[in-house]
Image (tube, rainbow, N blue to C red):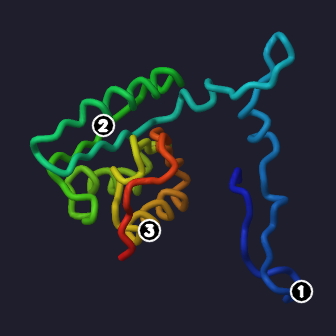
Amino acid sequence: MGRGCRFGPHPGGAPAVADHSLVDKNELQKQFIVDKNGVQRYNKVMEANKKTALYLRVSTSDQSTELQRSELLAYCNARGFSDVEIYEDIGRTGTSDNRPALKKLIADAKQRKFDIVICWKIDRLFRSLKHLILTLQEFDELGIKFIRIETRGAEPSPVRAY
Protein backbone atom coordinates (compact mmCIF):
# COMPACT_ATOMS: atom_id res chain seq x y z
CA MET A 1 0.00 0.00 0.00
CA GLY A 2 1.21 3.53 0.50
CA ARG A 3 1.74 3.96 -3.24
CA GLY A 4 -0.28 6.69 -4.90
CA CYS A 5 -2.04 4.85 -7.69
CA ARG A 6 -2.30 1.58 -9.56
CA PHE A 7 -2.86 0.90 -13.23
CA GLY A 8 -4.49 -2.29 -14.29
CA PRO A 9 -7.56 -3.88 -15.78
CA HIS A 10 -10.78 -2.42 -14.52
CA PRO A 11 -13.61 -4.76 -13.52
CA GLY A 12 -16.06 -5.24 -16.36
CA GLY A 13 -13.44 -4.81 -19.06
CA ALA A 14 -13.34 -1.02 -18.92
CA PRO A 15 -10.03 0.68 -19.78
CA ALA A 16 -7.26 0.83 -17.20
CA VAL A 17 -7.32 3.96 -15.06
CA ALA A 18 -5.37 5.32 -12.12
CA ASP A 19 -6.92 4.17 -8.86
CA HIS A 20 -6.14 6.85 -6.29
CA SER A 21 -8.25 5.10 -3.66
CA LEU A 22 -5.25 2.89 -2.86
CA VAL A 23 -3.53 5.67 -0.91
CA ASP A 24 -3.20 4.50 2.67
CA LYS A 25 -4.67 7.43 4.58
CA ASN A 26 -3.25 6.17 7.89
CA GLU A 27 0.23 6.17 6.33
CA LEU A 28 -0.27 9.75 5.11
CA GLN A 29 -1.45 10.87 8.55
CA LYS A 30 1.69 9.42 10.19
CA GLN A 31 3.86 11.64 8.00
CA PHE A 32 2.65 14.73 9.84
CA ILE A 33 2.10 15.48 13.51
CA VAL A 34 0.45 18.38 15.28
CA ASP A 35 2.69 20.08 17.84
CA LYS A 36 1.59 21.57 21.20
CA ASN A 37 0.77 24.87 19.44
CA GLY A 38 -1.53 23.14 16.96
CA VAL A 39 0.90 23.51 14.05
CA GLN A 40 1.15 20.58 11.64
CA ARG A 41 4.76 19.48 11.17
CA TYR A 42 6.60 16.74 9.31
CA ASN A 43 7.10 13.65 11.51
CA LYS A 44 10.89 13.10 11.53
CA VAL A 45 10.59 10.03 13.77
CA MET A 46 8.80 8.10 11.04
CA GLU A 47 11.80 8.37 8.68
CA ALA A 48 14.45 8.19 11.40
CA ASN A 49 14.07 4.44 11.78
CA LYS A 50 14.72 3.78 8.10
CA LYS A 51 17.97 2.42 6.74
CA THR A 52 19.69 4.97 4.55
CA ALA A 53 22.24 4.70 1.74
CA LEU A 54 24.37 7.69 0.77
CA TYR A 55 25.89 7.75 -2.71
CA LEU A 56 28.94 9.96 -3.34
CA ARG A 57 30.86 10.34 -6.59
CA VAL A 58 33.60 12.47 -8.07
CA SER A 59 34.85 12.22 -11.64
CA THR A 60 38.60 12.38 -11.07
CA SER A 61 40.88 10.86 -8.48
CA ASP A 62 42.28 14.28 -7.53
CA GLN A 63 38.81 15.46 -6.40
CA SER A 64 37.37 14.90 -2.94
CA THR A 65 33.95 13.73 -1.81
CA GLU A 66 34.38 15.51 1.53
CA LEU A 67 31.85 18.32 0.79
CA GLN A 68 29.25 15.76 -0.35
CA ARG A 69 29.96 13.56 2.67
CA SER A 70 29.72 16.37 5.23
CA GLU A 71 26.50 17.81 3.78
CA LEU A 72 24.86 14.39 3.43
CA LEU A 73 25.79 13.39 6.98
CA ALA A 74 24.53 16.74 8.30
CA TYR A 75 21.26 16.17 6.42
CA CYS A 76 20.95 12.69 7.95
CA ASN A 77 21.84 13.95 11.43
CA ALA A 78 19.22 16.73 11.24
CA ARG A 79 16.56 14.15 10.39
CA GLY A 80 17.64 11.53 12.89
CA PHE A 81 18.83 9.00 10.29
CA SER A 82 21.28 6.90 12.25
CA ASP A 83 21.49 3.66 10.23
CA VAL A 84 23.55 5.02 7.32
CA GLU A 85 25.82 3.26 4.84
CA ILE A 86 28.06 5.19 2.44
CA TYR A 87 28.68 4.09 -1.15
CA GLU A 88 31.51 6.06 -2.73
CA ASP A 89 33.00 6.14 -6.24
CA ILE A 90 36.15 8.20 -6.78
CA GLY A 91 37.51 8.89 -10.24
CA ARG A 92 34.43 7.52 -11.99
CA THR A 93 32.42 9.22 -14.72
CA GLY A 94 28.71 9.77 -14.23
CA THR A 95 27.96 8.82 -17.85
CA SER A 96 28.61 5.13 -17.21
CA ASP A 97 26.93 2.65 -14.91
CA ASN A 98 30.19 0.69 -14.62
CA ARG A 99 31.13 1.94 -11.13
CA PRO A 100 31.93 -0.42 -8.24
CA ALA A 101 30.06 1.46 -5.49
CA LEU A 102 27.07 2.12 -7.74
CA LYS A 103 26.88 -1.56 -8.66
CA LYS A 104 26.95 -2.48 -4.95
CA LEU A 105 24.29 0.17 -4.19
CA ILE A 106 21.98 -1.29 -6.84
CA ALA A 107 22.66 -4.88 -5.74
CA ASP A 108 21.95 -3.92 -2.11
CA ALA A 109 18.78 -2.10 -3.21
CA LYS A 110 17.54 -5.30 -4.85
CA GLN A 111 18.14 -7.07 -1.51
CA ARG A 112 16.22 -4.26 0.29
CA LYS A 113 19.17 -3.44 2.55
CA PHE A 114 17.95 0.17 2.84
CA ASP A 115 14.79 2.26 2.49
CA ILE A 116 16.21 5.57 1.30
CA VAL A 117 18.99 6.60 -1.12
CA ILE A 118 20.36 10.11 -0.72
CA CYS A 119 22.70 11.91 -3.14
CA TRP A 120 24.17 15.36 -2.89
CA LYS A 121 23.19 16.30 -6.46
CA ILE A 122 21.29 14.23 -8.97
CA ASP A 123 24.23 14.23 -11.39
CA ARG A 124 26.30 12.41 -8.75
CA LEU A 125 24.10 9.38 -9.41
CA PHE A 126 24.12 9.69 -13.22
CA ARG A 127 24.78 12.16 -16.00
CA SER A 128 23.13 9.78 -18.47
CA LEU A 129 19.41 10.52 -18.54
CA LYS A 130 18.64 6.96 -19.63
CA HIS A 131 20.57 5.40 -16.73
CA LEU A 132 19.12 7.92 -14.28
CA ILE A 133 15.53 7.24 -15.26
CA LEU A 134 15.98 3.46 -15.23
CA THR A 135 17.66 3.53 -11.82
CA LEU A 136 15.08 5.84 -10.26
CA GLN A 137 12.31 3.66 -11.70
CA GLU A 138 13.96 0.58 -10.18
CA PHE A 139 14.21 2.31 -6.78
CA ASP A 140 10.53 3.25 -7.03
CA GLU A 141 9.51 -0.32 -7.90
CA LEU A 142 11.51 -1.56 -4.90
CA GLY A 143 9.80 0.98 -2.63
CA ILE A 144 13.05 2.89 -2.06
CA LYS A 145 12.79 6.63 -1.66
CA PHE A 146 15.36 8.77 -3.54
CA ILE A 147 16.41 12.16 -2.17
CA ARG A 148 18.84 14.70 -3.56
CA ILE A 149 19.72 17.49 -1.18
CA GLU A 150 21.54 20.07 -3.34
CA THR A 151 18.91 22.29 -4.92
CA ARG A 152 20.74 25.59 -5.32
CA GLY A 153 20.68 27.11 -8.79
CA ALA A 154 17.83 27.13 -11.24
CA GLU A 155 19.43 24.74 -13.70
CA PRO A 156 20.82 21.30 -12.86
CA SER A 157 24.19 20.17 -14.10
CA PRO A 158 24.13 18.79 -17.62
CA VAL A 159 22.55 15.38 -17.92
CA ARG A 160 23.21 13.58 -21.19
CA ALA A 161 20.35 11.90 -23.01
CA TYR A 162 21.43 8.41 -24.10
Estimate the spatial distance between the alpha carbons at disc 3 and disc 2, rounded to whole Å.
21 Å
Q: Amino acid at mark 1?
A: Gly
Q: Secondary structure at mark 3?
A: helix
Residue type (three-letter) at the residue carrying disc 3:
Leu
Decide if residue 57 is on the left or right side of residue 79: left
Q: Quadrant of the C terminus?
A: bottom left
Which residue is located at x 47 percent, y 63 percent? 138
Q: Position of residue 52 (x, y in %)?
A: 43, 37
* Left or right: residue 116 compared with residue 103: right
Residue 70's spot in the image, x, y percent?
33, 26
Residue beneath label 3, please?
Answer: 134
Res 12 label? 1
Q: Nearer the viewer, residue 72 or 140?
A: 72
Residue 122 lies left or right of residue 86; in this view the side is: right
Residue with the most extreme right position: 12
Location of residue 48 (image quadrant): top right
Q: Quadrant of residue 29?
A: top right
Q: Distance from label 2 to label 1 (Cα)?
A: 49 Å
Q: Residues within 10 Å of mark 3 (few under 14, many from 20)?
A: few
Residue at the farthest bottom position = 13
Q: Is residue 115 above or below residue 137?
A: above
Q: Quadrant of residue 56?
A: top left
Image point (53%, 25%), residue name: 79
Numbered disc 2: secondary structure: strand
Q: Residues within 10 Å of mark 2 (few under 14, many from 20)?
A: some
- Up the image or down, 116 lies above or below 98; here it is above
Residue drawn 48% across the image and 40% down it: 152
Q: With 44 as the anchor, is 123 left or right in this view? A: left
